[in-house]
Amino acid sequence: MEHPTPNTSLRRRRGFGAWLAVVGVSVVAAIVVPYTLIPLITHPLATYFFWTGFSLVITLFVFWGVRSWRDEE
């Protein structure tokens, strides 16, 4: 039986492991920081600043993750 040639679009992308690790750390931070660190900060806008910064960082991660997407014909 002949083995099909691997599809080049399915090969492992360079940097995917790093991206996945950073996203994983971000998910953990989204769970840990609001319940452990933010209550210790007395600034009234601490929650606002955390979630604003967090959303900007996640937006950058999304751009990083999709920057190499291309349409194939």
Image: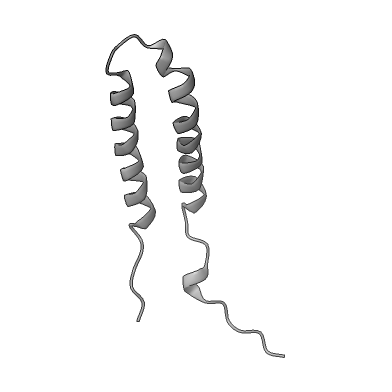
- Please give the name of the residue rendered at 44% of the width and 32% of the height, measured from the top-left corner: 30
Quarter of the picture containing the N terminus is bottom right
- Please give the name of the residue rendered at 36% of the width and 64% of the height, measured from the top-left corner: 69
Residue furthest bottom as drawn: 1
Q: Position of residue 31 (x, y in %)?
A: 49, 31
Residue furthest right as drawn: 1
Q: Which image quarter: residue 73? A: bottom left
How many marks on residues? 0
Q: Position of residue 56 (x, y in %)?
A: 29, 38
- Please give the name of the residue rendered at 37% of the width and 45% of the height, measured from the top-left corner: 61
Residue 33 falls left or right of residue 48: right
Q: Position of residue 53 (x, y in %)?
A: 30, 31
Which of the pair 17/45 is nearer the observer? 45
- Please give the name of the residue rendered at 48% of the width and 18% of the height, measured from the top-left corner: 36
Q: Which image quarter: residue 33? A: top left
Q: Does residue 59 sit above or below 2 in this rendering?
A: above
Which of the pair 40/66 is nearer the observer? 40
